[in-house]
């Protein structure tokens, strides 16, 4: 167990039983959710690769426009993180009508 997790568990042990159970449930839910995402991505690599190839082909044939970060809100996006994993450095591509 990491030192940070040990510190967190020490603090959790000081809480009433009901609150400890709530935190334990949250941890289990998060772990289960992580497993589901891992499985979903592992089982969809071919499909994701195909979609990425299609998006790249559309970009290279100039069928897309760059969406600036401020315009992504109108598309329902709260933030933009691309391949680099750095917010704001990559952008979202949208298809031209």
Image: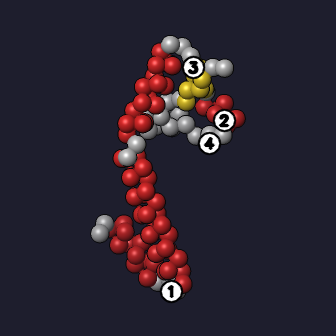
Residue 30 location in percent, x, y? 46, 63
Residue 21 location in percent, x, y? 50, 80
The answer to whether residue 72 is left or right of residue 32 is: right
Residue 48 location in percent, x, y? 42, 36
Above or below, 12 relative to 78: below
Closer to the N terminus: mark 3 or mark 2? 3
Which residue is found at the position 43% from the left and 63% from the top? 32
Above or below, 35 relative to 81: below
Closer to the N terminus: mark 1 or mark 4? 1
Foreground tag (3 vs 4): 3
Foreground tag (4 vs 2): 2
Residue 84 is at least partly visible in this image: no
In-front residue for pair 45/1: 45
Circle 3 residue: 64
> Do labels 3 and 2 touch, CB within 8 Å?
no
> Do labels 3 and 1 touch, CB within 8 Å?
no
């Amino acid at each position: 167990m990491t030192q940070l997790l040990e510190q967190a568990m020490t603090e959790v042990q000081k809480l009433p039983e009901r609150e400890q159970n709530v935190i334990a449930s949250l941890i289990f839910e998060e772990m289960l959710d992580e497993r589901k995402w891992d499985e979903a991505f592992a089982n969809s690599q071919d499909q994701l690769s195909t979609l990425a190839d299609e998006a790249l082909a559309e970009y290279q044939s100039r069928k897309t426009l760059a969406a600036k970060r401020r315009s992504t809100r109108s598309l329902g996006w709260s933030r933009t993180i691309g391949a680099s994993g750095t917010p704001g450095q990559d952008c979202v591509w949208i298809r031209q009508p």
